[in-house]
Each structure stands twice: as C-alpha cells, then as structure tokens.
Amino acid sequence: MHAASPPDADDALQRWNERFSQPGYLFGREPNAFLVTQSARLASHARLLCVADGEGRNSTWLAARGYEVSAFDLSPVAVNKARALAAELGVSVEYQIASAGTWTWSAAQYDAVAAIFVQFAAPAQRAALFAGMWQTLKRGGLLLIQGYTPKQLQYRTGGPQQLDHLYTADLLRELLPQAQWLELREHDAVLGEGSAHRGLSALIDAVARKP
Ligand SMILES: C[S@@+](CC[C@H](N)C(=O)[O-])C[C@H]1O[C@@H](n2cnc3c(N)ncnc32)[C@H](O)[C@@H]1O
C-alpha cells in the first residue's frame, strides 16, 4: 500500500472551481469576524492585500471602509464572483486570478496582508508562502491570520482534513521568526460563515507586526 500523492495544482483549481460554482457564497458574503475586529489596527487609507480571497467577502468589506485593496485567488470562478460582489456593493478592489505559488511578492508594498483560512499549502510550499507574505509587507505592516488548528480534525466543521496543513502557535512562530506578535491565540469558537465554515471550530488568531 502506498500513500496517495498530494493533489497537484490542476486538481486544486478544479476542486475550488467546482465548490465555487454552486449557487450562493461558500463562506458567506459577510466579512470574517476576526478580520473585522482586527481592522481597528489599520490606519485609514492603508494599502492591503487579501491572499486567496475567494469570493470577495473580505476584500469588498475592507474596500467599503476606504482601504486601497488588492486581492488574488487561484479560482477564476471565485474571482468572477468577487468582482460581481464588488460591483454590486459599489466598491473598488484590484482583483487578479493567480496562484500563491507564482504570485510576485513585491517587496514592502502593503500596510497589511490578510491571510484568512489560506491553509491550502502543504509544508513544502508553506514556508515560501509565509516568506512572500512577509516580504510584501512594509516595515510596521501587519499580517492578519486566521486558520484552523489540529483540534479541528475532531470537529470537522470546515477546513482541510490534512493535519500538516493546520496551524499551531509554535508553527507560526517558526514560520515568522522576526514577527512581533500582537495576537497569537488558539481558541474554540462557533463559526457561521456560509455553508462551509459552520459550527464549533478550533481556531488560531494571529497578528504579526513586521518590525
Ligand atoms: C477556505 S477558502 C478561503 C477564502 C477566503 N480567504 C475567505 O476567507 O473567504 C481558501 C481559498 O484558497 C484558494 N486557493 C487554493 N489554493 C490556492 C493557491 N495555490 N493560490 C491561491 N489561492 C488558492 C481557493 O480558491 C479558496 O478561495
């Protein structure tokens, strides 16, 4: 018996496109609650990047608050829905269809990067993803992260089913050794984000400041 090989990029693209092709919004239209609370830390007119933004619930909410928002996602189906949501809400977001693996992480571009449930990366790709998000932050910029912890495998209320995709505080400390941690907290909470994140969930909230 041999272990199944990890899904390649084409499989991931097809899987996410299929999920986003269903009617409605997989993770809802409302912004992620952690992002809403943490937005109090952002200066007005801050320049923000939403990584793997999906159907645009977070990017459109931030744009409506006056931030200059860029966002990308692997799935063209998701990005088209995000563009439609932005048009419906009358807000402007610079969207791109792109994989995190090929994204150009231009140095010192953003005041904050939002990485909300971006746990698609296996360990081999995750170090590069975090290095890229860190590189694209300005000095003093914030990386806002919410994800699932390994305990989520017991709850099964959303997120990846692979243990090595999940985050712990120790893992985030290791991935971002230079960070000043304004928040780094593992906790349980009930989520109600669309149909995909629903019920008691094992979460990690993190805010890393780039010194
Ligand atoms: C759990 S969803 C979260 C979406 C969004 N951040 C939110 O909170 O609503 C994960 C997202 O990652 C995207 N994704 C998966 N693999 C990706 C990759 N390699 N590069 C960029 N986005 C990717 C998916 O298309 C999906 O939109």
Image (tube, rainbow, N blue to C red):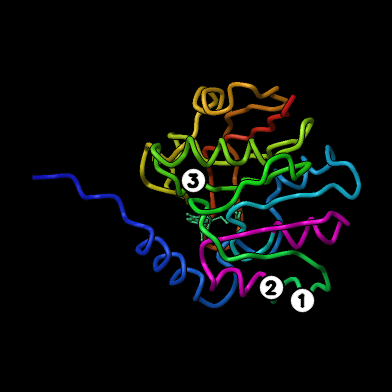
Q: Residues within 10 Å of mark 1 (few under 14, many from 20)?
A: few
User: Considering only vertical position in the picture, is 74 above or below 159?
Assistant: below
Local SS, label 2 = helix
Q: Magenta stretch containing residue 118, yes or no?
A: no
Q: Earlier in the sequence, mark 3 or mark 1?
A: 1
Residue 87: which disc? 1
* Extreme residue in the right direction: 44
Looking at the image, which is closer to me, 98 or 150? 98
User: Considering only vertical position in the picture, is 88 above or below 106?
Assistant: below
Q: Which residue is mark 2?
A: 83
Amino acid type of the residue that numbered disc 3 sits on in the rendered structure = Gln
User: Considering only vertical position in the picture, is 12 above or below 185?
Assistant: below
Q: CB under 8 Å between callouts 2 and 3?
A: no
- CB of mark 1 near ligand 1 (< 8 Å): no
Amino acid type of the residue that numbered disc 2 sits on in the rendered structure = Arg
Q: CB under 8 Å between callouts 2 and 1?
A: yes
Residue 22: x and y in percent read 50, 75
Residue 195: x and y in percent read 54, 63
Quarter of the figure with the N terminus: top left
Which stretch did the figure color magenta? 58-82
Q: Magenta stretch containing residue 62, yes or no?
A: yes
CA–CA distance in space, label 2 to label 3 = 23 Å
Q: Quadrant of residue 177?
A: top right
Q: Earlier in the sequence, mark 2 or mark 3?
A: 2
Local SS, label 1 = helix
- CB of mark 3 near ligand 1 (< 8 Å): yes
**In the image, 2: left or right of 91?**
left
Residue 9: x and y in percent read 38, 58
Residue 133: x and y in percent read 62, 41
Q: Which residue is mark 3?
A: 119
